[in-house]
Image: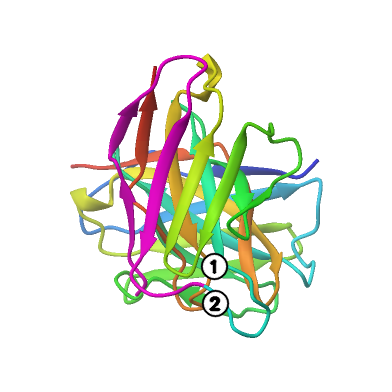
């Protein structure tokens, strides 16, 4: 049974960098058929894509966040990470990591972590 | 970007009755190469991550009760719950996975009893 678990600081100061990791268990992050992604949800609001990564390093980022986002993979630790720079209060959200499985040339989110709340505040 | 618009924003349905949620995409998510609609539905209960219910617009994920069904093609899609149960209270999201650059979600529909 695949499990994903987010970890990282719950409080980040404005203008600083948000850093989260997602530990993958019950499966291998270097599976060629999967991508691994980050999605966020501001309190009481809807879901927003941040980006996704293949273990080979291929990435896709939300254009609205691209200048501030980096997603990376560490196959030795079976985990992937998110860095979001120059954060503001608008980046306060629950951050989910997720697996995306193969779906006829695209990818489909089929597993989610429980999510971690990150608050941006001084 | 492909914009996804759901209607209504919220919905109240009696137990045992049918619930219908609509989703419209700003451009077609039907692939001409394989005739598949790259449209998924997710259910999110309070305090939980979303759960995949339906993909390819109408294929139920393993373990999803058959009271959940999806339909539609191109730009217009529907999620139907045939007989509402108490445990179906949740927010439902549609999502397109057609556009390689960015997979986008609808704004969500809150379903209540």
Residue at numbered disc 2? A59
Tell me whether circle 2 and circle 1 mark residues in contact (CB < 8 Å): yes
> Where in the figure is residue B107, as x and y percent of width and height?
32, 49
Horizontal placement of B38 versus B63: left or right? left
Where B38 falls versus B110 (above or below)? below
Which residue is drawn at the image coordinates 54% and 67% (left, top)? Answer: A52
Which residue is drawn at the image coordinates 52% and 16% (left, top)? Answer: B16
Which range of residues does the magenta coloring cover? B1-29
Q: Mark 1: few, some, or many residues within 10 Å (few <14, many ≥20)?
A: many
> What's the coloring here?
rainbow
User: Please, what secondary structure does the residue beneath circle 1 have?
Assistant: strand
Where B11 falls versus A10 (above or below)? above
Disc ID at residue A52:
1
Whichever of callouts 2 and 1 sits on the residue coming sooner in the sequence is 1
Residue A21 can be seen, yes or no: no
Q: Nearer the viewer, residue A31 or A120?
A: A31
Horizontal placement of B19 versus A21: left or right? left
């Amino acid at each position: 049974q695949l499990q994903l678990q987010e970890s990282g600081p719950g409080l980040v100061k404005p203008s600083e960098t948000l850093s989260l990791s997602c530990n993958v268990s019950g499966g291998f992050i270097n599976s060629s058929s999967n991508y691994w992604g980050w999605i966020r949800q501001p309190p009481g609001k809807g879901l927003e894509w941040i980006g996704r990564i293949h273990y080979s390093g291929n990435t896709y980022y939300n254009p609205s966040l691209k200048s501030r986002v980096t997603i990376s993979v560490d196959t030795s630790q079976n985990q992937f990470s998110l860095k979001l720079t120059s954060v503001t209060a608008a980046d306060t959200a629950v951050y989910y990591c997720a697996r995306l499985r193969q779906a006829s040339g695209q990818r489909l989110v089929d597993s989610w972590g429980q999510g971690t709340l990150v608050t941006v505040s001084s | 970007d492909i914009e996804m618009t759901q209607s209504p924003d919220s919905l109240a349905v009696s137990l045992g009755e049918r619930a219908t949620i609509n989703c419209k995409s700003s451009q077609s998510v039907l692939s001409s190469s394989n005739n598949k609609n790259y449209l998924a539905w997710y259910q999110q209960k309070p305090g939980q991550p979303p759960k995949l219910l339906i993909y390819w617009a109408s294929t139920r994920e393993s373990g999803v009760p058959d009271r959940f069904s999806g339909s539609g093609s191109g730009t217009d899609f529907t999620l139907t719950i045939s007989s509402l149960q108490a445990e179906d209270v949740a927010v439902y999201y549609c999502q397109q996975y057609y556009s390689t650059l960015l997979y986008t979600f609808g704004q969500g529909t809150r379903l209540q009893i």
